[in-house]
Amino acid sequence: MKEFRGKVAVITGAASGIGFALAERCAQEGMKVVLADVEEPALRAAEERLRAAGAITLGVVTDVSKETEVEKLAQTTLQTFGGVHLLCNNAGVSAGTTVWQSSLADWQWVLGVNLWGVIYGIRTFVPIMLAQESESHIVNTVSLAGMVSLPGMASYKVSKQGVITLSETLYHELKNQTAKVGVSVLFPGGVRTRLIDSARNRPTDLQNDPSLDTQTPEEKKQREARRQRKREQGLDPAVVAHRLFDALRAGKFYIFVQPEQKSEAQLRMEDILQEQNPRHAFATS
């Protein structure tokens, strides 16, 4: 996809981080932008920021883990702008600890947003894009965490690996139909986002029992300090948006925003092909 001016973009998780940076870039490209996010106050603020900059935009409160809300997002987009040409399945959350210590609620919430949210987006929007018979594109935000073998964040990595193979399968299926719908997977790397604070949007029915939290006040203080360092050290989300559009114009499927991180993915591929036990980069450095 090379031409964006006058077309319609739909972005989930658009109220902050990578999602908002994508929305800003879409507006700069002359697109009409539909912002979708579950956090309404932040969504309205993002909507106002774009409008103040002259963008044509619309905010739709959306929980992507619910199919009915994704369908409502699509219908609202069609009613307002008449079509959709760029879908960014970007909403994401993270929770849990080890594979066995993560609660069932951790797994349900993370897979519900990160994997089912993308499934719902594809099932809802692809038929619309096919019916338009005009050039359109889907971008699924994944993560290097879905390509490497590291301890922790099991549910997050399972969800992202699922989106990678989902995207690859969709790519081949659309190619078989010679459709005018393209697909890409975006690997952002470390970026300054609010992913580590995603619990702020966790549904009440999927909350963990507070009595199960065994961390001491000092451990919680250290955890917050680590979070703050991650925020400060990450890449500017605007860089992600810039590199994404360069990659879209180049027709890329796999989009590594930070190419130096490919070595970690390569390590895993070598382990698989050589049938050797899993390693990870931090263990061998």
Image (cartoon, rainbow, N blue to C red):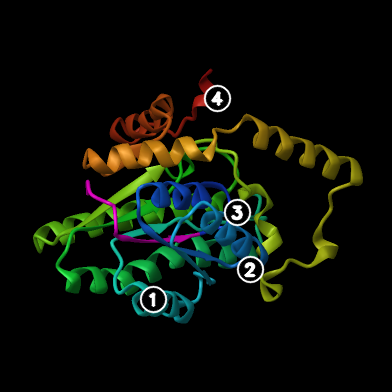
Under circle 1, the secondary element is helix
Residue shown at 40%/37% (left/top)? 242
Q: Nearer the viewer, residue 235 or 215?
A: 235
Looking at the rendered structure, the kind of residue marked 4 is: Ala
Task: State the image coordinates of residue 254 (x, y, percent, origin top left).
Answer: 30, 41
Image mark for residue 94: 3
Disc on the earlier residue, 4 or 1:
1
Q: Residues within 10 Å of mark 3 (few under 14, many from 20)?
A: many
Q: Is residue 267 visible?
A: yes
Q: Taking 210 as reference, is 97 above or below it?
A: above
Q: Which residues are magenta?
A: 1-12
Image mark for residue 40: 2
Which residue is label 4 attached to?
A: 283
Q: Are marks 2 and 1 in contact (CB under 8 Å)?
A: no
Task: State the image coordinates of residue 227 (x, y, percent, origin top left).
Answer: 71, 40
Q: Nearer the viewer, mark 3 or mark 1?
A: 1
Cα separation between marks 2 and 1: 19 Å
Cα separation between marks 4 and 2: 41 Å
Residue shown at 61%/49% (left/top)? 195
Disc on the earlier residue, 3 or 4:
3
Cα separation between marks 4 and 1: 52 Å
Task: State the image coordinates of residue 58 (x, y, percent, origin top left).
Answer: 48, 68
Q: Nearer the viewer, mark 2 or mark 1?
A: 1
Q: Residue furthest right?
A: 217
